[in-house]
Amino acid sequence: MEHTTLMEKRVIRHTLHETFHDYLRERFGGDESEVTQTLDIAESIIPDMLNQSFGTNYGSIYEIQDVNDIEEFRKKIKAHPVLRSQDMASEPRFTEVLRDYRLFVKALNSNTIPIPVPGETDKTNPLPATPPSETASPKKRLSTIYLEGEAGEAQEVVYRQRNMELRQACIDHFKELHGGRLVCECCGFDFKRAYAIEDEYIEVHHRFPFSQTDGEHPVDATTDLVPLCANCHRMIHHGMGGRGNCMSLDELKSKLR
C-alpha cells in the first residue's frame, strides 16, 4: 500500500513537472535554456531552502498549491537578510521563480492549463519522457512581468538583461513594420538618415509606466513599448506633469504640429 502511495506521488510530481515545463516554455517564448534554469531552481533548490530557513517539510515544490503561501514565501525571502542577498545574486532570482510558479498554480486553479493523465494514451508507459527540445533557435524575449517595487528595488543583472532583450524585441518589431527603418513612432524622425549613423539609436518608451500600474503587471515588447525620439519621449511625459506619468501616443500625436 505504501509502495502504491509513493508511486502515485511520483506520477503526480512527474505530471506537474511536465505541465510546468510546457507552461514555462510558452511563457519564455521557447527559450529552453531559461526553462531549464527556472525548473532547476524550482525543483532542486527552493524546497530545501524553504525547509532549512522556515521550518517547512516539502519534498517537492509541487506540494505547495496555495498561491497565498507562495506569495508569502516570496515576501519572507525578501525580508530575510541572508536569503535576500542570495536572491539578488542568483540567476534567475528565487523570488522570480516563485513568481512564475505562483502564476502557474493560479492558472492550474482556474483550469486554464489542462493536466495530462500519465498513462492515459499509453498504458505501458505511465511516466512519459520529457519531449526533446526543438533544434530551432529560441525566440527573442517578447514579454516579461515586473512586480510593484521590484523595478526600482535594484538594477540587478537579470533586470537589466531583460530590459535590453525587451528593448531589442521592440526595435525589431517596429523596424519590420517600417521596412527596416527605425523611426520615432510619433514624429517619424530617423536618426540614421539625419546623422548618418550605423547604430540603432532611439529611446524606448513604456506606454504604461510603473507609477501608473499596481501590483503585478506584464510588459510586452510589441504592445507596451514604443520607439520615440528624445523630444517626443520628453513631451509624452511632460504633457502629464512628469513624475513618471505620461499621455497616450495618440494624444501626443494629436498635439504635434
Image: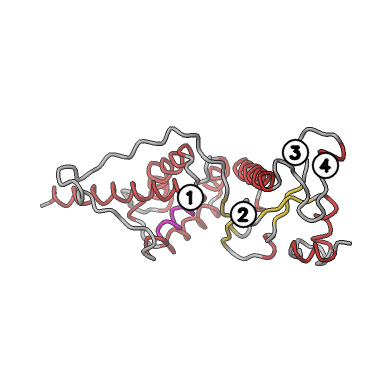
Separation of residues labelled 1 and 2 (CA atoms): 20 Å
Residue 41 spot, x, y in % from top left: 43, 42
Picture quadrant where residue 187 is located: bottom right
What's under tag 4, amino acid-wise?
Answer: Phe
Provide the residue designation for mark 2.
Answer: 150
Task: Mark 1 or mark 2: name the one nearer the start of the chain.
Answer: 1
Q: Viewed as shown, does residue 58 lie left or right of 214?
A: left
Q: Amino acid at mark 1?
A: Arg
Residues tagged 3 and 1 counted as in contact (Cβ below 8 A): no
Q: Nearer the viewer, residue 17 or 236?
A: 236
Mark 1 or 4, nearer chain start: 1
| 234 over 44 or under it: above or below | below
Residue identified by numbered label 4: 191
Stretch in magenta = 99-106
SS class, disc 1: helix
Disc 2 marks a residue whose amino acid type is Glu
- The residue that label 1 is drawn on is 27
User: How many C-alpha atoms fall within 10 Å of the one at disc 2: few (<14), some, or many (≥20)?
Assistant: few
SS at mark 4? helix
Q: Residue at x 70, y 63 (%)?
A: 211
The residue where tag 3 is placed is 200
Separation of marks 1 and 4 at Cα, in angstroms: 34 Å
